[in-house]
Image (cartoon, helix red, strand yellow):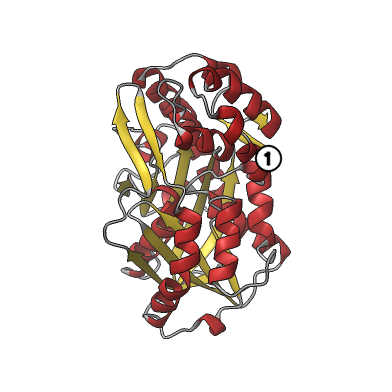
Amino acid sequence: MKSVSILSLATATPSNVLSQADALAAARELIGPNFPDFDRLASVYANAGIETRQLAMPVEWYLSERTFQERTDVFLDVALDLFVEVARKALAEAEMGAEAIDAIVTVSSTGIATPSLEARAMAHLPFRSDVARLPIFGLGCAGGVTGLALASKIARETPGMTVLFATVELCSLALRTVNADKADLVATALFGDGAAACVVQSGGDGFAQIEGSAEKTWNDTLEIMGWQAEPTGFGVILNRAIPGFARRNMHEAMREMLAAQALTLDDIDQFICHPGGAKVVDALEHALLLAPGSLVHEREVLRDHGNMSAPTVLFVLERYLASGLPPLSALNALGPGFTASQLTLRRTA
């Protein structure tokens, strides 16, 4: 089987920084008056493990109810800017121009763009006119792992094929102030905005080889996480059962996904996890038989950026690269479906 290497990894966030204290104050103003249990549940802000996050717009923009059109206009502007930024960074790190890219895989589930983001980016980056494009919607928090896995499968088909994978999520645009419920309160305490990109290449010489990937979707779990369509845009579906579900199910799921690659949990030197929230990180440590508190970089990314959905796990990978990637790692994330996605990385540099 042809090897596929990750040549580069880049991340970016919007410039609007919001502290957790200011997030609580804004949510109290927006949601509190129409949500009787707000004060009782407000401890979620202190317990989320987040100090700051970055938003697509200044906090004042969110203080007014926004239409679906207004949210979409912001998505098209800000998501495109972030796409171009991380693509440029990833290409520069890989020491290649946009014309070297044979295919682009784009993952985003927090806004709708047709033409899609990579098509719009062609006005800013000199991609070839024959570049293959694969925009993907609906993967949610699992999109960083699943999208990178799909990019690697495309690259593997042709020797020397080079694929740009990019993911942009603007979770803050789903803020709902009318008929808000507990899920909305948790979302305002947890989610931020960000983007990440990688260049992968068949037979390339990068910092890691993608050795394999796998997914597991549980039946009858559609209500755990996702979106529901509403007049003003997307309404969040976020079930409080997620940490418990991960604690009960991720050990066996990871064992099955690794077994499909002739690996065991003991073969993995480092599990690199999407930090869906502080309780989810605790649950993953328990399920994967890790020492409590050992997923340090996951907690750091959560602290500094919040949960940015799909790009978040690549922010975590970036920190592991900076501190020294171990020989064999398992990148993993949970997302709507309800689905676990896993990718195996072998260090080469």
Instruction: Describe residue 324's horizontal placement relative to residue 32 as left or right.
Output: right
Instruction: Describe residue 37's horizontal placement relative to residue 252 as left or right.
Output: right
Q: Quadrant of the C terminus?
A: bottom right
Q: Quadrant of the N terminus?
A: bottom left
Number of marks in the rendered image: 1
Foreground residue among 73 and 50: 50
**Percent from the top left, x then y, of residue 105?**
37, 51
**Residue 196 vertical placement versus 180 (above, below):** below
Q: Circle 1 is placed at which residue position?
A: 46
**Percent from the top left, x then y, of residue 201?**
44, 64
Badge 1 density bin: few <14, some 14–19, many ≥20, Cα 10 Å: few
Whether residue 3 is visible, yes or no, is no
Taking the view exactly as shown, the residue that stands out farthest to the right is 323
**Residue 214 vertical placement versus 197 (above, below):** below
The amino acid pointed to by label 1 is Ala
Instruction: Describe residue 79's horizontal placement relative to residue 297 as left or right.
Output: left
Residue displayed at 31% across by 27% down: 230
Taking the view exactly as shown, the residue that stands out farthest to the top is 64
Foreground residue among 209 and 30: 30
Question: Label 1's element?
Answer: helix
**Residue 208 vertical placement versus 236 (above, below):** below
**Percent from the top left, x then y, of residue 175?**
47, 28
